[in-house]
Image (cartoon, rainbow, N blue to C red):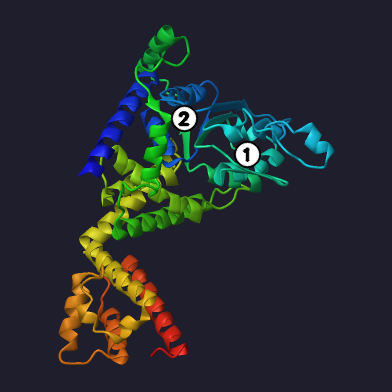
Amino acid sequence: MESHQTIEAAAAKLLSAERFINGRLINRKRVVRQAMYALLTGEHLLLQSRTGAGKTLLADQVFSVFTGQRVFKVQASKEQQPDTYFGGLDIEQLKKGHMTHNTTGSLVESEFGFIDEIFDANDFTLRALLSLLNERRLSRGTQQVDASIHSVFAATNYLRVSEITEAVLDRFLFQAVILPDKNPYVQYRIGRKYLTHSGDIAAPTTSIPYSDLQQWTNIVGGKSEIDISVPSDVLYFLNLVAGHYEYARIRAEKDRKQPGVGEFYISPRKQAKAVDMLRAHAFMQGRSSVVMEDVAESVAVFATLGMEEHENLFKKSYSSLVNTLSVSNGFSQLKVLLGFHDLLNEIEMNPDLMNAPLSKLDATPVRRTFLDWVKESLGGADSSFAQNKKLLEGYLSEFIPVCDEIRDLKSSLELELREFLQDLAKHGNS
């Protein structure tokens, strides 16, 4: 109960800050929520729009609600070198043949960063930024320094496509396109805000210590005693949706792919980090567990918000899988097979269990359906290795998948079981 109350109280503070930001930034609720996810997960946000859409104002206003952090701001250009971001070179060390940056006041020693027109930077500088953005570490020659970076927001008026920029883009877990809204009422509201603030940020009425944000990020990242649980079936479904969406994007873009533009790709890094985004969403709802419906919100990771075609493809992938698994009882079968995976994993960790009665493994996180099936199948049989092998193989053999997604999972488990048994036989454990 205490953990739940802690998350509820923290969520209330963050939602209050979000409401304040939305009061200053007109018609930006979705990207502001995306910024909150970026901060909670300790990830980066890329904002793309035409000039004058308020990208810098958005970053400044979001950063302003926190206190105690250092903020690094720079406008990128082709003439800049890495020392613009890492700090100037120490001349005395350079004379001795050592390339050492004086990191004081640089991005390396800042918790928040804002890089304007990031793709105006040359490829050499962008390549140098990769490890800083991802590993939070300055690696230049013999100089190895841990960075303080929590989140970097970057802005651009255009995307420059190359091998380097593709790697840079993958470092930004969250991406959004901000399209100007020419609706007269929206423009009127923007005008009213301009009359009040003259284009500057609004001074926060209350603020959040950066130390609080660090604690919340640890909770969301699974690095705290306070846990936000992610059920196995939700995690598996998240990856089903990601794969379905990736395939849909590739098909949709195949006929109009431009020369030099790579095929759409969701990296394993992004797919893994999407789990933290689910926990961030649950956190903002004041919950200590992720639920299946939260997967719909992962559109904020896998699609570029503001690109209606991409968002619609994601929503179609999500709803299609929900319908398939709901109508066919696939969600129940998913839990059953993942429960079998739990049992198989426990046996792989302790192969001696193959010589014990599987029907008595009630302490394992396996689904009751398998235990009931084992007890019915055993009858008066012994618990020899051969008998347990027959039970494990027989259960999967008799399992009838209701859809392709469950059939693929069953096939993967059959392969894992086969390889495990072969490995046992090879080492004389059978």
The percent coordinates of residue 267 (x first, y second) are 51, 54
Does 379 sit above or below residue 3?
below
Q: Amino acid at mark 2?
A: Ile
Where is mark 1, residue-wise?
160
> Is residue 411 at least partly visible in the picture?
no
Image quarter of the N terminus: top left
Left-right relation of 178 to 207: right
Residue 113's image quarter?
A: top right
Image mark count: 2
266 or 42: which is nearer to us? 42
The image shows residue 159 at horizontal and vertical percentages of 59, 37
Is the residue 311 above or below the residue 199 in the image?
A: below
Residue at horizontal 46 percent and vertical 40 percent from the top: 42
Report the residue marked by disc 2.
Answer: 178
- Dot 1: few (<14), some (14–19), or many (≥20) neighbours within 10 Å? some
Which is nearer the N-term, disc 2 or disc 1? Answer: 1
Q: Residue at x 31, y 69 (%)?
A: 342
Q: Is residue 125 visible?
A: yes
Specify the farthest residue to the top: 195
- Mark 2 vs mark 1, CA separation in Å: 17 Å
